Image (cartoon, rainbow, N blue to C red):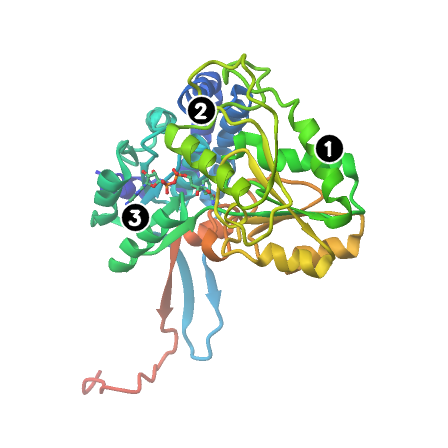
């Protein structure tokens, strides 16, 4: 059904595809509160974060709606007499596999540009958090996207995910998730020689120089790691602080972080919820223990006895004085746990930032403009912030270097990712010289 729906979709005038994606954005806005509550219940994320993410998805639909009738080809002045033009054509059916940490957000982030480029999308959300993706599929129908254009398969990775990767209709894959799963997905794509875009994890360096605006940097460092309880691919999970500032910085950050309100995710005042699931909770706890065993100083507020029993609570946790070779500095924790690492000077900060296989994001906090730009250029990462953290937008390319993946699924780069080029050569010479073969006599 997806292939048939895709043919119906690409058969519509481009502006009509745009109108329907715009309508989908409007439906996401209409259902915003219900979607936010569903996401909140399914993920444990604070409702205010869920509301923000739903609003971003509506914005994505509207952004990509505007692109539908602006995907143009080009002509190339080749040395022969040919007219050469290049068309951008959709792949057909795109498989989008998404993780549990931002289910509706990643669903919109990956499905909407693929749809705008003229593809059908089969969505395989995480088995932990399928609900909002299923709702998205229903809204796509209501927005008059052809039946079957957006299909949601809520199943396990090892069964449904692998079966979809093997489905002959699937012509391209976009994957957001962990590095080891990403490698399996890439291998499955390679075996079928189909392309994939991979957005994997990170171990991003948040670099604070002694000349930074201290209160702002302390607040930024909390935002970088504790937002979403650290279950964010771009989390600033390695906090590199200039040695003269390190101890003061972590003390101030610990004091401020103790004020973060953990609680019922449905309560609008809640700033941090529990981590998403039992497996993740055990993983985070094991890595905190490993960090302490490797010599880190643990700074964390004690568990608030008022928190509901049984939740997967992890208080904001700072592991101070970590060395970059430690497990907690190299492995993705994906929880509200930051490894603070001291450095001496700019050269060491850059060297430490790059001493990881990952390359998703990073930031620098400094008042020295020249240094800000030098460090931004020197750190290997797909996204970098100066005196800020975490902002991303559908109009800006996002993706990883190295083990954080490849390909970009936002900004105009995404239009290249979700289309393939076709070069058309048109002979224009009156008496073409083909160089081989003979004209039929009298012809
Ligand atoms: P995961 O890799 O366990 O699962 C991701 C998705 O892959 C799920 O839908 C899962 O069902 C599916 N899957 C699992 N095994 C599969 C298989 N063999 N074949 C096909 N599909 C399979 O990741 P997760 O634990 O859900 O998410 C956390 C990870 O996602 C973290 O590493 C995080 O950094 C990363 N992430 C990255 C970004 C980014 O944009 N770079 C964004 C969000 C999350």
The residue indicated by pointer 2 is 312
Q: Is residue 387 left or right of residue 96?
A: right
Mark 2 lies on a secondary structure that is loop
- Considering only order in the chain, which callout, 1 or 3, is on the residue closer to the N terminus? 3
Image height of 77 relative to 371, above or below: below
Mark 1 lies on a secondary structure that is helix
Q: Is mark 3 within 8 Å of ligand 1?
A: no
Residue at x 57% of width, y 42% of height: 237
Q: CA distance from mark 3 to mark 2?
A: 41 Å
Number of numbered discs on residues = 3
- Considering only order in the chain, which callout, 2 or 1, is on the residue closer to the N terminus? 1
Mark 3 lies on a secondary structure that is loop
Q: Is mark 2 within 8 Å of ligand 1?
A: no
Residue 49: percent from the left, percent from the top? 54, 25
Q: CA distance from mark 3 to mark 1?
A: 53 Å
- Badge 1 local density, few (<14 within 10 Å), some, or many (20+)? some
Residue 316: percent from the left, percent from the top? 58, 29
User: Disc 3 vs disc 2: which is toward the camera?
Assistant: 2
Image height of 12 relative to 189, above or below: above
Pointer 3 with pointer 2, Cβ within 8 A: no
Report whether residue 20 is seen.
Answer: no
The residue indicated by pointer 3 is 92
The residue at the far left in this view is 441
- Badge 3 local density, few (<14 within 10 Å), some, or many (20+)? many
The foreground one among 438 and 113 is 113
- Badge 2 local density, few (<14 within 10 Å), some, or many (20+)? some
Residue 376: percent from the left, percent from the top? 67, 55
Q: Is mark 1 within 8 Å of ligand 1?
A: no
The residue indicated by pointer 1 is 252
When asked about the image quadrant of residue 147, the answer is top left
Q: CA distance from mark 1 to mark 2?
A: 26 Å
């Amino acid at each position: 059904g997806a292939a048939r729906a895709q043919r119906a979709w690409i058969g519509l005038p481009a502006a009509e595809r745009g109108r329907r994606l715009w309508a989908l954005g409007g439906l996401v806005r209409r259902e915003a509160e219900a979607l936010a509550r569903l996401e909140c219940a399914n993920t444990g994320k604070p409702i205010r974060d869920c509301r923000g993410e739903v609003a971003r998805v509506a914005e994505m639909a509207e952004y990509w709606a505007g692109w539908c009738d602006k995907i143009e080809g080009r002509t190339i002045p080749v040395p022969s007499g040919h007219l050469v033009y290049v068309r951008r054509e959709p792949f057909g059916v795109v498989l989008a596999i998404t993780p549990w940490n931002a289910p509706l957000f990643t669903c919109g982030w990956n499905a909407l540009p693929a749809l705008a480029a003229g593809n059908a999308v089969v969505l395989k959300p995480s088995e932990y958090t399928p609900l909002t993706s299923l709702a998205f599929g229903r809204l796509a129908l209501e927005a008059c996207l052809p039946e079957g254009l957006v299909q949601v398969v809520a199943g396990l990775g090892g069964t449904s995910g692998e079966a979809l990767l093997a489905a002959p209709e699937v012509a391209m894959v976009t994957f957001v998730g962990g590095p080891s799963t990403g490698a399996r997905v890439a291998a499955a794509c390679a075996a079928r020689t189909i392309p994939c875009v991979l957005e994997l994890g990170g171990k991003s360096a948040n670099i604070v120089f002694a000349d930074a605006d201290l209160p702002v940097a302390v607040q930024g460092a909390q935002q970088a790691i504790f937002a979403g309880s650290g279950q964010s691919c771009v989390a600033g999970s390695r906090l590199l602080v200039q040695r003269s500032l390190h101890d003061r910085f972590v003390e101030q950050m610990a004091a401020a972080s103790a004020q973060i309100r953990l609680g019922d995710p449905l309560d609008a005042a809640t700033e941090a919820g529990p981590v998403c699931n039992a497996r993740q909770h055990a993983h985070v706890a094991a890595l905190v223990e490993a960090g302490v065993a490797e010599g880190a100083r643990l700074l964390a507020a004690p568990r608030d006895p008022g928190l509901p029993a049984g939740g997967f609570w992890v208080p904001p946790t700072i592991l101070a004085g970590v060395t970059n070779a430690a497990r907690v500095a190299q492995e993705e924790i994906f929880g509200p746990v930051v490894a603070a690492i001291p450095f001496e000077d700019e050269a060491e900060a850059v060297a430490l930032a790059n001493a990881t296989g990952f390359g998703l994001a990073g930031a620098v906090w400094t008042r020295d403009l020249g240094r800000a730009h030098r460090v931004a250029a020197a750190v290997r990462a797909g996204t970098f912030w100066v005196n800020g953290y975490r902002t991303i937008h559908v109009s800006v390319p996002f993706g990883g270097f190295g083990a954080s993946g490849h390909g970009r699924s936002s900004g105009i780069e995404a239009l290249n990712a979700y289309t393939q080029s076709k070069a058309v050569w048109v002979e224009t010479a009156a008496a073409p010289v083909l160089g081989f073969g003979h004209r039929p006599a009298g012809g």
